[in-house]
Amino acid sequence: MGWGSFILPYLEQETIHRQIDFKAPIEAPVYDNLRTTVLKMFVCPSDLSTGVYMVQNMVEQDVAQAATTSYTANYGSGKLEIGEQPDWGNGVFVRNSAFRISDIYDGASQTWAIGERCSWVARSPWVGAIHNGTVATSNGAPTKYIQREEAPVQVMAGVTNYLPLNDENTTLYGFYSPHRQVVNFAYADGAARPVSTQTSSLTLQALASRNGGEKISDAEY
């Protein structure tokens, strides 16, 4: 299960949360209704290609239907492969992680927790990482390349390619917004703030890492 499933009680979605057995696989038929429930708080109103879609595996076979999210967890920064190294990130979320505020040495107010990766670029399920599922470039995405990535990338993104936000060369590992000039992020302290697409790569890496020791000011982003 992904971060979206765990915070449902705090979004007044206790009824849906009570349906979840966190030890059962998401793709199990018992979760058909849960997976395909569209939750508006997980969908940006400006996003495209949202709604229920079919999650496929690496050879484009159908795995399970799911409802999309416009947001994904912050895996961190650096030359890491989220799909192959889902446990190695230096962000607030890695696979099966449980970081405390005290583990965010760079400061909760300067570290991303959740960021936009819109369905316009790549559709992924709010409920979590579906076993054998993948993330693929959406039809009509504003990016140059067609890609398909492994199951962990369904729920995590980061700053792993040193490209600007909303760059047309972005990989599916990156954050991307339907808003032209900014990408919105929820920080580890609970605040939600936009980050300019003109922000430098070094500053983006600092905001993505929880323990890099970087010093940045609000004026940098």
Image: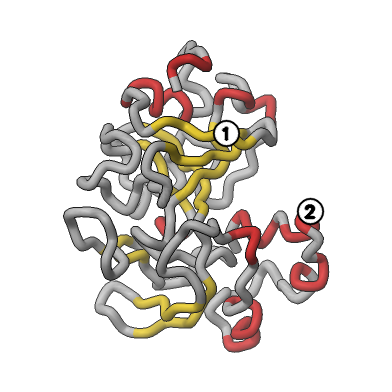
Percent coordinates x, y for residue 153 in the rendering: 40, 56
Percent coordinates x, y for residue 167 in the rendering: 26, 42
Q: How many marks?
A: 2
Residue shown at 56%/23% (left/top)? 110
Secondary structure at badge 1 equals strand
Percent coordinates x, y for residue 211 in the rendering: 51, 23
Amino acid type assigned to the residue bearing label 2 in the image: Tyr
Residue shown at 42%/30% (left/top)? 196
Mark 1 is surrounded, within 10 Å at the Cα level, by few (under 14), some (14 to 19) or many (20 or more) other residues, namely some
Where is 143 relative to 98, above or below?
below
Q: Quadrant of the N terminus?
A: bottom right
**Quick check: 160 left or right of 33?**
left
**Quarter of the view holding residue 159:** top left
Amino acid type assigned to the residue bearing label 1 in the image: Arg
Give the residue number, with chain letter if any, for mark 2.
Answer: 10
Whether residues under marks 1 and 2 lie with C-beta atoms below 8 angstroms apart, the answer is no
Residue that protrudes farthest toward the bottom in the picture: 29
**Quick check: 82 left or right of 145?**
right
Where is 32 relative to 175, above or below?
below
The one nearer the camera, 173 or 47, is: 47
